[in-house]
């Protein structure tokens, strides 16, 4: 089974029907993926998810209102975290590891600090802390203005030949699945999620209480030239968290983990297996 | 063969007789270790060097005036780099990988930028760039005032139980060899090297020309709570270098690489083998 072939399944709780895929080795703590701005289960990189599935169960899902999940997309990170908790409850999972990318990395921070018993270890990729530096709307607007073959090429990768080449390879991997795909996110989903991200970064967190409340081992991963959430966010999260490891990749943008999927998966596996 | 059992050998060039040990797998690019302030070949962590020797040739040596090498310890990083170049010439090695720790990480920056053809890849651990932030004398003075069982416990590790425990294990590994050991460095060596480090950090490098001149792939490793060279130095080096990866470890001090030797050796091997 792979991300490209795993069937989409559904589970219902609190009046919301969640779409998800679950596969991989039936061993250890399952790894829950928390997705980026407007992303669905089909926007993950199969190279990353499949590599991690070799040694653990992986779960990708559409949070409320996304893809084929019912319900309303909330406009706060906290409400997204509450939906994720409901989803885990419906699956009967008492504890998971998290891999949150971008917006998903913000949801991961809330889960690890406010629902700490649910979380064993967490990976935060391309995210920002509460009160962090974001350039979401300017970067998204600029990316769409470029009329690229796929908007993720300017959004997730640097202009260098190497990064753009890695970006094209990522797009090919992420579009390989043709059957049983999620619909793309609506404008309303994007607007609600943008409010959530901008609100998260606008609200200062005095004394970095959220980050300091995260006691689980964490791996923070970021690109050197992330234009949406500059890499100083990652350094700042690292400094405030008590048990975080930081890995920054060269010549990489917001989608650093998809630029070097084998290297990232190796680092993630090493961290999760420690 | 291991760091604990490899015989000390000697090679002479330019009137200097260099002491060194060389062992490991005879494959790929040899890895040259560049040592920290007042350190000799016997101050490396066998767990780190032996792990890396499994997949490549490793070379540890005493630079001019250190341990059993003859000559005068210079008081500039640039002169130390020139001595290292002479040593490599005497061994007949046209290209090496570098692992420079602390002062050795400064020497590595000069080698990679000014003698670039000699260097394929480099690892810089616990160092600072030209113009970087250092607290050498204050930290060394404070460490000696604590009358610890070994001054490296307060110098290289954080006060936490976990870090101090890892520190004791490191000291045990680094003192396991009893025969054919180097003498400890004299006060004169410490004074010359302190001038070199302080001079390196005092001199601003406009436009970070040294870092920008390093084109080789680099891995920068640092502890979260390095009191001698704060971790912002590592972040700054990462941002100015074109092909650097950054890894920062949690709850760790100047000797982070010796605190998590297996994790570090794994990261280093992954980087060198890419």
Image (tube, coloured by chain):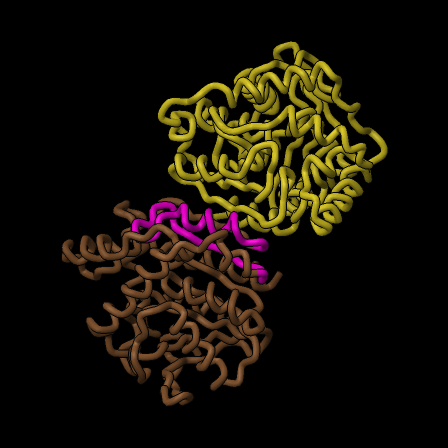
Chain colours: A brown, B yellow
Q: Residue A68: percent from the left, percent from the top?
A: 30, 82
Regarding residue A162, the answer to whether it shows in the image is yes
Is residue B243 left or right of B105 when viewed as pictured? left
User: Going 41% across and 50% down the picture, which residue do you hit?
Assistant: A233
Q: Quadrant of residue A37?
A: bottom left
Above or below: residue A189 compared with residue A228: below
Please state the total of marks drawn on the protein image: 0
Is A221 included in the stretch rendered in magenta? yes
Q: Residue furthest front?
A: A206
Q: Quadrant of the N terminus of chain B?
A: top right
User: Going 48% across and 53% down the picture, which residue do you hit?
Assistant: A208
What stretch of residues is rendered in magenta?
A215-243
Q: Residue furthest right?
A: B178
Above or below: residue B161 compared with residue A113: above
Q: Nearer the viewer, residue B117 or B146?
A: B146
Regarding residue B25, the answer to whether it shows in the image is no
Q: Residue B115: percent from the left, percent from the top?
A: 46, 23
Q: Residue furthest top?
A: B15
Q: Residue B191: percent from the left, percent from the top?
A: 67, 16
User: Going 50% across and 71% down the picture, which residue do you hit?
Assistant: A31
Is A68 included in the stretch rendered in magenta? no
Above or below: residue B250 compared with residue A274: above
Q: Nearer the viewer, residue A72 or B217?
A: A72
Above or below: residue B55 compared with residue B59: below
Is residue B180 left or right of A126 when viewed as pictured? right
User: Going 74% across and 17% down the picture, which residue do you hit?
Assistant: B187
């Amino acid at each position: 089974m792979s991300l490209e072939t795993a069937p989409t399944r559904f589970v219902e709780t609190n009046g919301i029907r969640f779409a998800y895929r679950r596969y991989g080795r039936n061993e250890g703590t399952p790894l829950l993926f928390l997705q980026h701005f407007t992303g669905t289960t089909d926007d993950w990189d199969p190279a990353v998810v499949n590599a991690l599935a070799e040694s653990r169960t992986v779960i990708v899902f559409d949070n409320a209102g996304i893809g084929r999940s019912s319900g309303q997309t909330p406009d706060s990170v906290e409400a997204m975290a509450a939906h994720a908790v409901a989803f885990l409850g419906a699956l009967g999972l008492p504890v998971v590891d998290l891999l949150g990318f971008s917006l998903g990395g913000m949801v991961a921070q809330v889960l690890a600090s406010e629902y700490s018993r649910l979380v064993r270890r967490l990976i935060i990729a391309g995210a920002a802390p509460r009160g962090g530096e974001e350039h979401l709307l300017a970067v998204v607007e600029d990316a769409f203005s470029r009329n690229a073959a796929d908007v993720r090429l300017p959004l997730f990768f640097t202009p260098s030949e190497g990064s753009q080449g890695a970006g094209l390879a990522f797009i090919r991997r992420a579009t390989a699945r043709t059957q049983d795909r999620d619909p793309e996110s609506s404008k309303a989903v994007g607007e609600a999620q943008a409010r959530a991200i901008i609100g998260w970064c606008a609200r200062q967190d005095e004394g970095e209480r959220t980050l300091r409340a995260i006691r689980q081992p964490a791996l923070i991963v970021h690109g050197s030239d992330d234009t949406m959430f500059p890499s100083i966010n990652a350094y700042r999260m690292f400094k405030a968290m008590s048990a975080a490891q930081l890995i920054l990749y060269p010549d990489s943008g917001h989608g650093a983990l998809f630029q070097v999927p084998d290297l990232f998966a190796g680092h993630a596996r090493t961290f999760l297996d420690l």
